[in-house]
Amino acid sequence: MVSIKDIAKRVGMSPSTISRVVNGKKYVNPEKRELILRLIEETGYVPNKSARDMVLKRTFTVGIVIPDTFNMFQRQLFSIIEHHLESFGYHTLFFFVKFEGASEDDCLQRLKSEKLDGVILLHEIKSPRFYEYLAAVGLPCVIATFAAAEQRIPSIHVNEEQAAYDAVQHLIGLGHRKIDILSGGSFSFGQQRADGYARALHSAGLSRDAGREVFVKSYSAEAGMYGMRELLLRDRDFSAVFAATDELAIGAIRVLEDEGIKVPDQVSIIGFDDIDISSYIVPRLTTIRQPLGDIGERTATLLHKRILGEKPAESDVVLPYELIIRESTARV
């Protein structure tokens, strides 16, 4: 079996240089790197993971904390993050969390039992004990899709409040004045999107009406169906709905169609996230597009740098979003 020493001897370089190339590190002359990679391919050399882990004092394992509901948006994001982590040589472990505090404590205990190089949070943990543990053991962590400035943990996200404001402004620009909101009652991003909704109404001189607001337990399509039924029971005198996620919007559209209310002829719907299915449903969904590719790549890259001991240039990365206008919104 070919060893790293054999490779080093063949190219006349030190084993440490070969190791840097194998582990994807920089600081190696491009010509030397190309020579080493060509020889590795020719000889079929495979690094011994256990030996590498012992030398580098790393496990090349990253924990990803996700909600047990694991919606479509998070599935897409996780897939992108995992792809980039693999390019850095990491494999992943899942840590599922429910909404209640006891589940967060259980997640922390499971996390403590594993030897991890770092952690990515795709779920908004509220327990102080969780963050205290990360700080105490110095475990690198990156947050994706929401901010936690008080925890001093790097985060990658969009401006939720401003994006929601722009979404509702789109409806107002189409002439809508009776605009309902369908959102979730948990997590900061839901509140921020509701704040953006309220600010857009205020800037247009429209009063906020609690009767036009429904907050459901989750952000799923099923919750969207439940929430839209609740809105219809309260009041049918609305011409548009801002849904805080695409899945909520999709559930809402299903109920409206069942009730014989045409979208967008009678009611316009706008979502948030731009999950893949949003461009395939009928009518195709107008929404706020989060830059999933950038969020995923930057999250994985930032965690990798933190694991290597590099300090990020900025702790809170706010990425641009985009209003995607499709067929679910129309002028009054």
Image (spheres, rainbow, N blue to C red):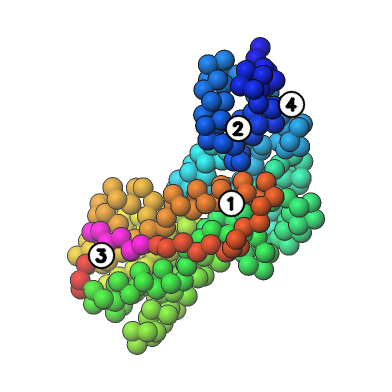
| Front-most of residues 48 and 78 | 48
Mark 1 lies on residue: 302
Q: Is residue 170 visible?
A: yes
Q: Type of residue at label 3?
A: Thr
Question: Front-most of 20 and 272?
Answer: 20
Q: Which of pointers 3 and 2 lies earlier in the amino acid sequence? A: 2
- Disc 1 or 3, which lies upstream in sequence? 1
Whether 274 is drawn above or below 40: the answer is: below
Cα distance between the residues tagged 1 and 4: 25 Å
Q: In this image, 108 relative to 299: left or right?
A: right
Q: Secondary structure at mark 2?
A: helix
- Viewport quadrant of the N terminus: top right
| Residue type highlighted by circle 2 | Val
Is residue 221 toward the left or the right of residue 31 in the image?
left
- Position above or below: 99 against 268: above
Q: Residue at x 26, y 76 (%)?
A: 173
In the image, is residue 56 above or below residue 45? below
Which region of the structure is painted magenta? 322-328
Of callouts 1 and 2, the N-terminal one:
2
Between label 2 and label 4, give the one nearer the viewer: 2
User: Where in the figure is residue 161, as x and y percent of width and height?
Assistant: 46, 71
Q: Nearer the viewer, mark 3 or mark 2?
A: 2
Quadrant including the C terminus: bottom left
Q: Which residue is mark 3?
A: 329
Looking at the rendered structure, the kind of residue marked 1 is Leu
* Residue matched to label 4: 51
Which of the 4 image quadrants contains residue 323?
Answer: bottom left
Q: Position of residue 196 (x, y in %)?
A: 44, 74
Mark 1 or 3: in front is 1
**In this rendering, which labeled residue sits more in front, label 4 or label 3?**
4
The residue labelled by disc 2 is 21
